[in-house]
Image: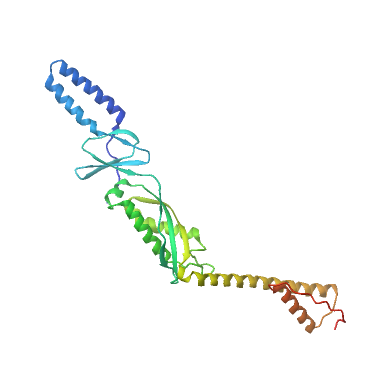
């Protein structure tokens, strides 16, 4: 595996000044009568000019000599190196990649639609150039493959209290997705800074049925909470009536009272009161 190492380069401004001084010196040599030495020196000086190049911030130059990797330059500004070195520019800036919506079966076999956003950057310029054919295309394809593999490992909705699901645990899922993508992109000299789900939904063919199931689950949970509260209120009412001695009720009347209170408290519609103007019994 080819890993990045520092390549040979000099401060371009310093080399520029030296070459100007040498060029003037060789012209003076020619004027003094030593034409051959002056011409040879001028030609050699001219051959050094193609060695200048610019490095922008968050950018690297990968240099090769006759097919061999000789190093990378990250120092910004005007630089100079051996003119025979072939230089290729690699961006080290942070980039965003948003995958397309893909359809995949979750852990329970339900078809879902999922997409992700991956924040990445090149951290090893040599690996990015020499280990893969096209590192940008490699990032796109491997990110979608990692997303598909991760989505098939978890259920859409949690099946138990401790279970991790795609919809209910976004933080854990994001960390898992980041690890999955990083394992695949490490050989390309790429570091994944962040990975998160940008779209998550059931596939169209089952979306309606799953929505009804979610609504039914929510209704059942709400009803259970209402019944729990109503039972507590009825129990409290009976205890307070008994403690204050407001009225003495036998078991049959208690049952009727409990039934009426539960109807009032648990009903989803307003109840109509009935006023009893007769005797207690």
In the depicted view, which residue is nearer to us: 197 or 158?
197
Q: Is residue 134 above or below residue 104?
A: above
Residue 2 in view: no
In the depicted view, which residue is nearer to us: 241 or 140?
140
Residue 181 in view: yes
Q: Quadrant of the C terminus?
A: bottom right
Residue 254 place in picture, x, y as percent: 78, 80
Q: Is residue 38 above or below residue 138?
A: above
Q: Which residue does the image show at 29% across and 32% down from the upper left? A: 10
Q: Quarter-wise, where is residue 85 in the image?
A: top left
Number of numbered callouts drawn: 0
Image position of 36 (left or right of 170): left
Q: Which residue does the image show at 42% across and 61% down from the upper left? A: 101
Q: Quarter-wise, where is residue 64 in the image?
A: top left
Image position of 218 (left or right of 84): right
Seen as rendered, the residue at the extreme left is 36
Image position of 143 (left or right of 280): left
Q: How is the image coloured?
A: rainbow
Q: Is residue 61 above or below residue 44?
A: below
Q: Quarter-wise, where is residue 33 in the image?
A: top left
Image position of 109 (left or right of 211): left
Residue 9 place in picture, x, y as percent: 28, 35
Residue 230 place in picture, x, y as percent: 71, 72
């Amino acid at each position: 595996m080819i890993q990045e190492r520092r390549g040979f380069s000099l401060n371009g401004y310093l080399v520029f000044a030296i070459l100007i001084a040498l060029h003037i010196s060789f012209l003076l040599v020619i004027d003094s009568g030593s034409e051959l030495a002056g011409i040879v020196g001028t030609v050699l000086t001219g051959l050094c000019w193609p060695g200048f190049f610019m490095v922008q911030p968050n950018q690297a130059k990968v240099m090769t000599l006759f097919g061999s990797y000789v190093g990378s330059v990250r120092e910004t500004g005007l630089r100079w190196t051996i003119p025979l070195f072939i230089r290729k520019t690699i961006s080290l800036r942070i980039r965003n990649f948003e995958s397309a919506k893909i359809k995949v079966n979750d852990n329970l076999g339900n078809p879902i639609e999922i997409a992700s956003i991956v924040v990445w950057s090149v951290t090893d310029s040599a690996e990015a150039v020499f280990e893969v054919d096209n590192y940008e295309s490699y990032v796109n394809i491997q990110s979608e493959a990692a997303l598909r593999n991760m989505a098939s490992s978890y259920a859409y909705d949690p099946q138990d209290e401790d279970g991790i699901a795609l919809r209910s645990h976004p933080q854990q899922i994001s960390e898992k997705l980041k690890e999955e993508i990083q394992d695949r992109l490490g050989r390309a000299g790429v570091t994944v800074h962040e990975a998160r789900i940008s779209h998550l939904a059931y596939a169209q063919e089952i979306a309606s049925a799953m929505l009804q199931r979610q609504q039914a689950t929510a209704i059942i949970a709400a009803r259970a909470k209402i019944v729990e509260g109503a039972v507590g209120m009825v129990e409290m009412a009976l205890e307070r009536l008994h403690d204050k001695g407001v009225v003495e009720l036998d078991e049959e009347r208690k049952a009727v009272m409990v039934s009426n209170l539960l109807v009032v408290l648990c009903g989803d519609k307003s109840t109509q009161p009935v006023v009893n103007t007769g005797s207690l019994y």
